[in-house]
Amino acid sequence: MWNKKVYDAGGLAMHAGCKVIPVGRSQRVILIVGLSGTGKTTTTFTRQNNSKPVQDDFIALMPQGKIYGTENGCFAKTFGLDPKHEPTIYGAVTKRDAYLENVSQEEDGGPVDFYDASYTQNGRATFEFSALGWVEDARNIGPVDVLLILNRNDNIIPGVARLDSEHAAAYFMLGETQGTSAGGKDEMGKALRVPGTNPFFPLRHEQQGNRFLELHRSRPFEVYLMNTGRVGGPEGSPNSKKLTIEHSSAIVKGIAEGTISWTGDADFGYEVAQEVPGIDDLEVLQPRRLYERTGRGEEYRALVQRLKQERVAELQKYPGLEREIVAAIR
């Protein structure tokens, strides 16, 4: 119902987190979209420059970049939760007033085990934002400055790519990731595409893509594609590399501060990072380099062609989608 109400008012309901990052005397308003398991909550709550979360999972984006919030709490994934890498979420989840489900605990009580997957990896916790002690009220923030589109991939998606308006609408429509335990056993390991990363949208999906392009043109904001998985192959592959929470945090900080240097990518037409402060491994930013160094240049080129074909075929499923959105994938 809320999806439809927002759409009828000229906006777009988005399956998104929101945070504000102080930069100098101002602050940058960041939206984060992604399917379950892509790291949306982690990216929202990981701190850069004393950033503050605004929303965890659902917002309304209106003309001129205005944002409305819907939540006063968070529904966090718990498997593998570690106080070293995610201290904010861990601290809130382990307070007495948090609610946990599908999380292992001995029958007689005692500490919970966030690494026990004998029943399921899809553990969750709910807590109020007040448990954090530092949040920003959605009513107090300015218009959106940045949108991050998360994709937990394991081969040729770069750590971050900068998108123009048409690319932004296309990648928003594609809503890509690789399925994780957050989506259940049927989705684990599969390539998933959900337009807008919003499985709750009640209208024709091309209306999401077209409205997104319309909103972006009403007040342009920066849009980036971020890989929160791996490059070079799945976990266990000898030549693959993980994009860590620390990598992602450095990328988000660099985006907010405008300190990333960029170069064109001849294969996909977007821009990839040439240098990110805090990241000393260029191969996670430009996967082509990893494939070529390990003698897999042909594999890389084959993956590029296959991915392009799959993306074009996906966008062509939506006949009402604006032509420039489909044409952005070439």
Image: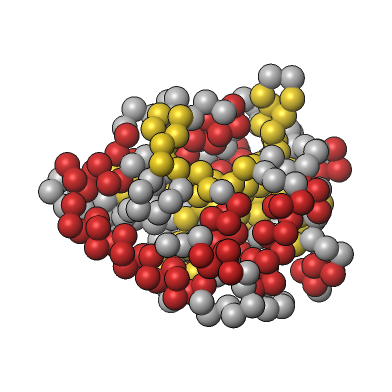
Q: Can you say whether 197 is above or below 187 in the image?
A: above
Q: Where is residue 77 drawn, in percent x and y?
A: 55, 55
Q: Where is residue 280 drawn, in percent x and y?
A: 34, 27
Q: Nearer the viewer, residue 222 or 36?
A: 222
Q: Where is residue 49 drawn, in percent x and y?
A: 62, 25
Position of the C terminus, as image quadrant, is bottom left
Q: Can you say whether 17 is above or below 180 in the image?
A: above
Query: At 53% across and 30% down in the image, what residue appears?
Result: 254
Return the residue found at the far top. Answer: 24
Specify whether residue 262 is in view.
yes
Specify whether residue 246 is in view.
no
Query: At 46% across and 62% down in the image, what residue appears?
Result: 329
Query: At 40% across and 71% down in the image, what residue appears?
Result: 310
Q: Nearer the viewer, residue 53 or 310?
A: 310
Q: Nearer the viewer, residue 273 or 186?
A: 273
Q: Is residue 70 left or right of residue 75?
A: right
Q: Where is residue 33 drawn, in percent x and y?
A: 60, 54
Q: Nearer the viewer, residue 149 or 43?
A: 149
Return the residue found at the far left. Answer: 295
